[in-house]
Amino acid sequence: MSGSAITPWVVGNWKMNPMQADAKALVNGFKELLQNNEIKEENCHLGVAPSMLALAGIQQELASAVRSVYSVAQDVSRIAGTGAYTGEVSAELLKDHQIDFVLIGHSERREIFGETASILNEKVKNALNAGLTIIYCVGESLEQRENGQAEQVVLQQICDIASVVQAEQWQKIVIAYEPIWAIGTGKTASPEDAQAMHAKIREGLTQITSFGSSIAILYGGSVKAENAVELAACPDINGALVGGASLNAESFYKIAQAFANTK
Ligand code: PEP
């Protein structure tokens, strides 16, 4: 399977947003747009990642959408199972609530909450053992890019999880390449730079796993309706992880439309 034969994914990362009433309006607005039936299941996977607090409620709202929209957890505990771990939500608890997808390794978790490779490995291992599909985020800082280390940093972040992902489990991994300098800054990597990194990631994945050519590699970093078509046109960009623009139903819909129609 070549990179462009992969069904694209468009996933909205709501981060620590929005308030309850706005979340409801957002999801209802998106559901209404989906009624146009322009984004077919077979042309694009869709997902939204609300706060942990809103996850179950949003999932319930999405159950009546005309097509499936996955509910994605923004994080998962490094601890498996159940027990006395105040504030934590394990992979098993997510699964018990029919949540099948989780973001791991977002740069905000790495940078603000100090999540190291070994912490992320525990999360990856637990999520896979519980049967979750992981959207694993990787990306370099501006300094690393300027020092010519971008590729090495990103490939290392992928190699980091290789020790805990068993052979068949690579089918449950989606990669999101999110250059840190492009997240929430309005600066998008140029389609050429993004494609070049995605091609390197694809090459790295095919060396690590026999599923390397079928793993979706999403781009994230100031994706918006205005730049989605040119990003979607890149052969190794198999979708988008969208922050800011996913908080507007119409923008998010247009991004999804761009990937569904271009791929
Ligand atoms: C993100 O945080 O995953 C992200 C890509 O954010 P934004 O689209 O706002 O840059």
Image (cartoon, grey):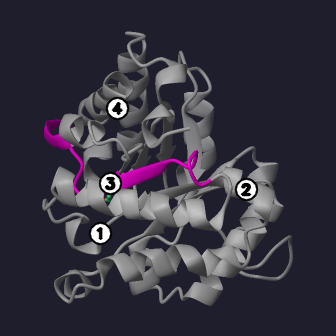
Quadrant (top left, top right, bottom left, bottom right) of the N terminus: top right
**Circle 1 — which element?**
loop
Image: 158 above or below 220:
below
Q: Earlier in the sequence, mark 4 or mark 3?
A: 3
**Circle 3 — which element?**
loop
- Which residue type does callout 3 highlight? Gly
- Which residue type does callout 4 highlight? Phe
In terms of image quarters, where does ligand 1 lie?
Answer: bottom left
Mark-to-mark CA distance, 4 and 3: 16 Å
Mark-to-mark CA distance, 2 and 1: 28 Å
Q: Which residue is mark 1?
A: 179
Q: Which residue is mark 2?
A: 94
For the question of whether residue 221 can be seen, the reply is: no
Mark-to-mark CA distance, 1 and 4: 20 Å
The image position of residue 256, as x and y in percent, is: 35, 31
The image position of residue 187, as x and y in percent, is: 13, 62
- For residue 218: magenta? yes
Mark-to-mark CA distance, 2 and 3: 22 Å
Q: Which residue is mark 4?
A: 259
Q: Which residue is mark 3?
A: 243
Q: Earlier in the sequence, mark 2 or mark 3?
A: 2
Q: Nearer the viewer, mark 2 or mark 1?
A: 1
Q: Earlier in the sequence, mark 2 or mark 4?
A: 2
- Determine whether label 4 and label 3 are within 8 Å by CB: no
Q: Nearer the viewer, mark 4 or mark 3?
A: 4
